[in-house]
């Protein structure tokens, strides 16, 4: 992903008339985001809601086109491919798992038809017996039984439904899965089961994941690298171990301090300080400066660029200046 940006025109003509504002109001949902994911690895994107992580997910699967920048997949410009005759082939290789397994499965369809849908859509298997055989295999790969294929989504728990979504996403034998908060709608006890299935599948099939989450405990469990987003920008990108052991960006530090300590019962965790600013009217300079304990005049005036400092990519003047270690 190379310098990708996406703006949305969120002008409401009636509102502009009332407020006498300029007619066009642009939301910079993602602004100059760059990262790589090595084959077979997981990059997690974290940040509070509204930071642009879901927009990145939608850009990668071709639901949105970027306003600027490129997404290279296997050396191929993915958005050029999405618009061309190769788009179908690419959609087969890049699949998405959504947050809500209650909303993403058609309640009127049997599991067999849900999981077989991508196979039918891409014309990969037509013979009914072969289709059923393949659906059975896919269900088994996510820890469900082939007998489950005659049932309907409402007959399953949330965790089982998310397994069905995963089976469906794997039907076309993708190389890359974009997972947008795949376990956030599930009970904590079920989350670990689904995450472990995803890790097993990754090992067995060499899958590459982009894993989006606001939950750093989950991210710690699944990722190899972590990117932290704030108001549409990446503010830190590091391998998981380094990020958790030695966070550099003040926002990353704040997020880490807010993780509840499992064994320190009764000890209050530090909440994430302050409010996310309005993305339609982002603060000047470093967008994090109104919430940052290390902000100074330069931070208010000048936007820090993401640069490599001590082997980590971080966008912060205080880190760059050595004021913050
Ligand atoms: Fe804080 Fe300044 Fe660094 Fe932004 S650039 S995170 S305001 S110290
Ligand atoms: Mg989201």
Image (tube, rainbow, N blue to C red):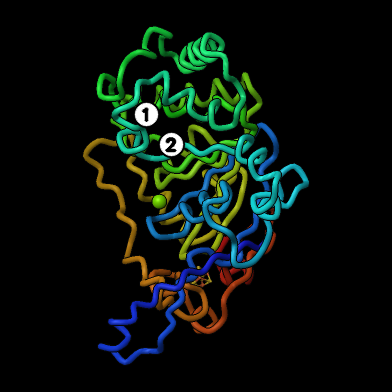
Where does label 1 land, which residue? 191
Of 281 and 248, the residue lying toward us? 281
In this image, 28 relative to 176: left or right? left
Can you give x and y, in whole percent of width and height, for residue 47 in the image? 44, 54
Number of disc labels: 2
Of 325 and 47, the residue lying toward us? 47
Quadrant of the drawing holding the C terminus: bottom right
Crowding at mark 2 (Cα within 10 Å: few <14, some 14-19, many 20+): many
Task: Give the vertical position of 10 relative to 15 (above or below).
Answer: above
Residue lying farthest to the front in this orientation: 127
How far apart in space, not on screen, are marks 2 and 1 (Cα)?
8 Å
Q: Which structural element holds mark 2?
A: helix
Where does label 2 land, which residue? 218
Residue at the image point whose x is 42% and y is 41% from the top: 181
Dividing the picture into quadrants, the one containing residue 66 is bottom right
In this image, 222 relative to 123: left or right? left
Task: Give the vertical position of 97 relative to 119 (above or below).
Answer: below
Q: Are marks 2 and 1 in contact (CB under 8 Å)?
A: yes
Can you give x and y, in whole percent of width and height, for residue 214 in the image? 40, 47
Can you give x and y, in whole percent of width and height, for residue 100 in the image? 34, 38
Q: Which structural element holds mark 1?
A: helix
**Res. 294 visible in picture:** no
Lower position in the chain sequence, tag 2 or tag 1:
1
Dividing the picture into quadrants, the one containing residue 4 is bottom right
Residue at the image point whose x is 53% and y is 41% from the top: 178
**Res. 8 visible in picture:** yes
């Amino acid at each position: 992903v190379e310098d990708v940006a996406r703006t949305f025109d969120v002008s409401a003509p009636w509102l502009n008339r009332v407020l006498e504002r300029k007619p066009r109001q642009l939301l910079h949902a993602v602004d100059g985001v760059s990262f790589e994911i090595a084959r077979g690895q997981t990059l997690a994107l974290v940040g509070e809601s509204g930071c642009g992580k879901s927009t990145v997910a939608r850009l990668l699967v071709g639901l949105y086109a970027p306003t600027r920048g490129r997404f290279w997949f296997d050396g191929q410009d993915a958005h050029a491919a999405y618009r061309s005759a190769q788009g179908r082939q690419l959609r087969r290789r890049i699949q998405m798992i959504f947050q809500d397994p209650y909303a993403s499965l058609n309640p009127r369809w049997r599991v067999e038809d849900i999981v077989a849908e991508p196979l039918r859509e891409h014309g990969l298997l037509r013979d009914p017996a072969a289709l059923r055989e393949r659906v059975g295999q896919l269900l088994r790969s996510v820890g469900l039984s082939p007998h489950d294929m005659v049932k309907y989504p409402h007959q399953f728990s949330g965790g089982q439904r998310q397994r069905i979504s995963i089976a469906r996403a794997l039907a076309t034998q993708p190389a890359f899965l974009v997972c947008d908060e795949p376990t956030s709608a599930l009970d904590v006890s079920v989350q670990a089961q689904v995450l472990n299935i995803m890790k097993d599948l990754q090992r067995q099939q060499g899958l590459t994941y982009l894993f989006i989450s606001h939950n750093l405990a989950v991210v710690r469990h699944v990722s190899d690298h972590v990117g932290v987003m704030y108001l549409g920008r990446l503010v830190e990108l590091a391998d998981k171990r380094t990020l958790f052991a030695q966070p550099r960006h003040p926002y990353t530090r704040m997020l880490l301090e807010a993780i509840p300590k499992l064994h320190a019962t009764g000890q209050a965790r530090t909440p994430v300080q302050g409010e996310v600013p309005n993305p339609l009217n982002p603060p000047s300079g470093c967008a994090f400066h109104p919430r940052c304990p290390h902000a100074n005049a330069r931070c208010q005036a000048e936007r820090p660029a993401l640069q490599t400092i001590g082997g980590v990519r971080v966008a912060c003047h205080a880190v760059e200046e050595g004021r913050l270690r």
